[in-house]
Image (cartoon, rainbow, N blue to C red):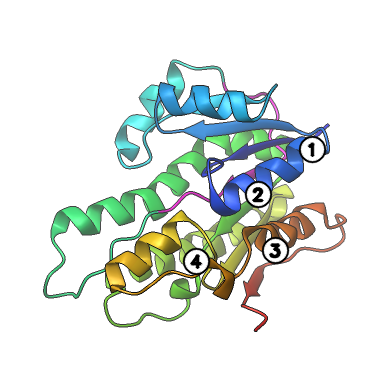
Amino acid sequence: MATHVITGAGSGIGAAVARRLHARGDALVLHARDAGRAKELAAQFPGADTLVGDLSDPDKLSWAFGHQSLPDRVDSLLHIAGVVDLGRVGDLTPKSWRHQLNVNLIAPAELTRHFLPQLRVAQGHVVFVNSGAGLSAHADWSAYAASKHGLKALADALRAEEHANGVRVTSVYPGRTASAMQAKVHQQEGKAYDPSRFIDPESVATTILMAIDLPRDAEVNDLTVRPGQ
């Protein structure tokens, strides 16, 4: 039975992936920002373990994990959590930059560092759910895009470093996906939100499971997912 560590399992793409893996009987370790959220996730996914730590404060993750039991085996580490705060370069504050860089880039690097020993033993898989903004930056998206461009660099470097250890690394670049984050983006853009216009999280989950289920003789490095209409 494979063991998967997942961030962002409470909603959107993360919840879709967790549901699929839970339904097939895999073991889940679900990251939560606090004890209350961990309790909700445990109720949503019976039998799953939880791991508490605030991604917005990556300096404290090591301390938080030191007071909890980490899994002995990790077959996949799925970085799906993320935050977005739109704004023009002339308006964004250092606080906004730090928050997005911490959650979207530095925390994934720190989580990966903690779980690399288990991933090496299992010859596991690290998946970074990136964004189209990780490939191209547009007006009002500077801080978010910078964090996602950095996430691509993290994935590419990790892949080169860990190839000899049998650890596979995949970056997934979804287009706009129907989720709570997308609703927030539309609110910030001042636009009406119609989830039917965007990718279903289940479709992105299908691509992620395809990557981690691929036989050992192949590896998906980069996967771009775009709306079909």
Distance between the Cα atoms at labels 3 and 4? 21 Å
- Tell me the chief SS of the magenta region: loop
Residue at disc 3, secondary structure: helix
Provide the residue span drawn in magenta: 70-82
Distance between the Cα atoms at labels 3 and 2? 9 Å
Residue at disc 1, secondary structure: helix
Task: Please state the horizontal and vertical placement of residue 80, each as a whole percent of the image.
Answer: 54, 51
Does residue 180 appear in this view?
Answer: yes
User: Contact (CB < 8 A) between labels 3 and 2?
Assistant: no
Type of the residue with mark 3:
Ser
Residue position marked by numbered label 3 in the rendering: 203
Residue at image location 42% in from the left, 65% down from the top = 148
Q: Residues within 10 Å of mark 3 (few under 14, many from 20)?
A: some
In primary-sequence order, the first of circles 1 and 2 is: 2
Task: Please state the horizontal and vertical placement of residue 20, each as a whole percent of the image.
Answer: 75, 45
Residue position marked by numbered label 2 in the rendering: 16
Residue position marked by numbered label 4 in the rendering: 152
